[in-house]
């Protein structure tokens, strides 16, 4: 078992990289379409991860179907929806909604029988859910683009939370590098037919060096490094603890969004953020072991 400091340092690094991802991705998508950006990110990460995991033990055949599911939840559904949603809404809205991941993860764990359902936890889930609905409702008043982006971010959160819960037993048994490398390889194949039209109609000659550098930075940091650290953390910590580090993202991402894009937080978003934070805190309270 790694030390507590080492484990939490890894989780904080993941949160920091994901926070930076909001800014870099939004800059890159000024020139690349979200779907092209998503596929290039996944395919590039798959190439790098295949080299990183080349010396790892082979994955047993009986685990291959599970990894296809992980790829669908954690890569194919998660990445495009996040990038599309981010391109349509503001950084701080996306970052606040990301904090619903622990609530979705806990709900999935309760449904699977891994966590105990208590009145406090259920109340926390309801409170956080109400906060997310409040954000979405506020964005619907702002514009249909922001509303659609907020909805996509919430679906992305649900998909990623399910990935955290269902992948934990496999991550505990197998090499994290091998599993994540296979996930991205499978994800790039599944997503290619969906992204094909966007890739073929992209104005490649007009894309600047800055956009390509943004893509490379997203592949290296928030994708390869963050996913490997996250997968490693899942071997040694509960999925709810890993998901709880999304608390760090809205703070860092909102500061960066205000600094770079001059975004301002309205009172409705602040109220909804407080509701989500309080709901996640209540939902995450310990409740004792699940009875046999």
Image: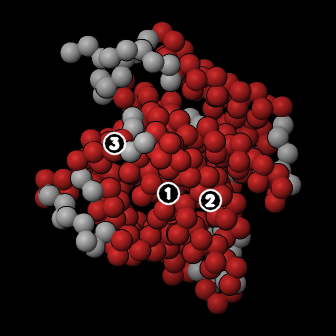
Rendered location of residue 252, percent (x, y): 71, 48
Q: Secondary structure at mark 3?
A: loop
- State how the image is colored: secondary structure
Q: In the rendered view of the protein, which quadrant contains the C terminus? A: top left
Foreground: 287 or 276?
Answer: 287
Image quadrant where one finds the N terminus = top left
Residue 278: image location, x then y, percent: 64, 22
Residue 131 appears at what percent x and percent y?
Answer: 65, 27
Q: Reply above or below: 117 against 132.
A: above
Q: Which mark is residue 1?
A: 3
Measured in 3D between alpha carbons, the distance from the residue under mark 1 to the one under mark 3, in whole angstroms, is: 20 Å
- What residue is pinned by disc 2? 21
The residue at which mark 1 appears reads as 226
Task: Give 114 or 57, whichever is nearer the viewer.
Answer: 57
| First reached walking from the N terminus: tag 2 or tag 1 | 2
Q: Horizontally, is 116 left or right of 146 in the view?
A: left
Between the C-alphas of marks 2 and 1, the distance is 10 Å
Q: Are marks 2 and 1 in contact (CB under 8 Å)?
A: yes
Residue at 76% across, 54% down: 256
Point out the tag, 2 or 3, that comes first from the N-terminus: 3
Tag 2 secondary structure: helix
Of badges 1 and 3, nearer the viewer stands 3
Numbered disc 1: secondary structure: helix
- State yes or no: discs 2 and 3 in contact (Cβ < 8 Å): no
Residue 204 position within the rendered picture, expressed as x and y whole percent measured from the top left: 61, 86
């Amino acid at each position: 078992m790694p030390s507590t400091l080492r484990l939490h340092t890894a989780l904080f690094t993941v949160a920091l990289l994901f926070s930076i991802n909001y800014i870099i991705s939004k800059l890159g998508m000024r020139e690349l379409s979200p779907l092209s950006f998503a596929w290039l990110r996944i395919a590039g990460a798959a190439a790098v991860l295949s080299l990183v995991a080349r010396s790892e033990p082979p994955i047993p055949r009986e685990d291959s179907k599970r990894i296809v599911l992980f790829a669908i939840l954690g890569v194919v559904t998660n990445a495009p929806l996040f990038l599309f949603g981010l391109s349509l809404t503001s950084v701080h809205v996306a970052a606040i909604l990301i904090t619903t991941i622990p609530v979705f993860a806990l709900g999935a764990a309760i449904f699977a029988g891994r966590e105990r359902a208590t009145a406090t936890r259920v109340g926390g889930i309801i409170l956080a859910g109400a906060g997310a609905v409040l954000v979405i409702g506020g964005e619907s008043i702002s514009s249909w683009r922001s509303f659609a982006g907020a909805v996509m971010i919430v679906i992305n959160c649900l998909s990623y939370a399910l990935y955290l819960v269902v992948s934990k037993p496999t991550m505990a048994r197998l090499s994290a590098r091998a599993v994540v490398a296979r996930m991205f390889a499978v994800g790039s194949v599944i997503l290619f037919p969906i992204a094909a039209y966007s890739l073929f109609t992209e104005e490649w000659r007009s894309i600047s060096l800055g956009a390509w550098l943004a893509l490379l930075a997203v592949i290296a940091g928030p994708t390869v490094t963050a996913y490997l650290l996250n997968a490693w953390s899942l071997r040694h910590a509960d999925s709810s603890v890993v998901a709880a580090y999304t608390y760090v993202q809205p703070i860092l991402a909102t500061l960066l969004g205000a600094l770079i894009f001059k975004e301002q937080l309205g009172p409705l978003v602040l109220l909804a953020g407080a509701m989500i934070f309080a709901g996640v805190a209540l939902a995450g309270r310990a409740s004792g072991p699940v009875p046999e």
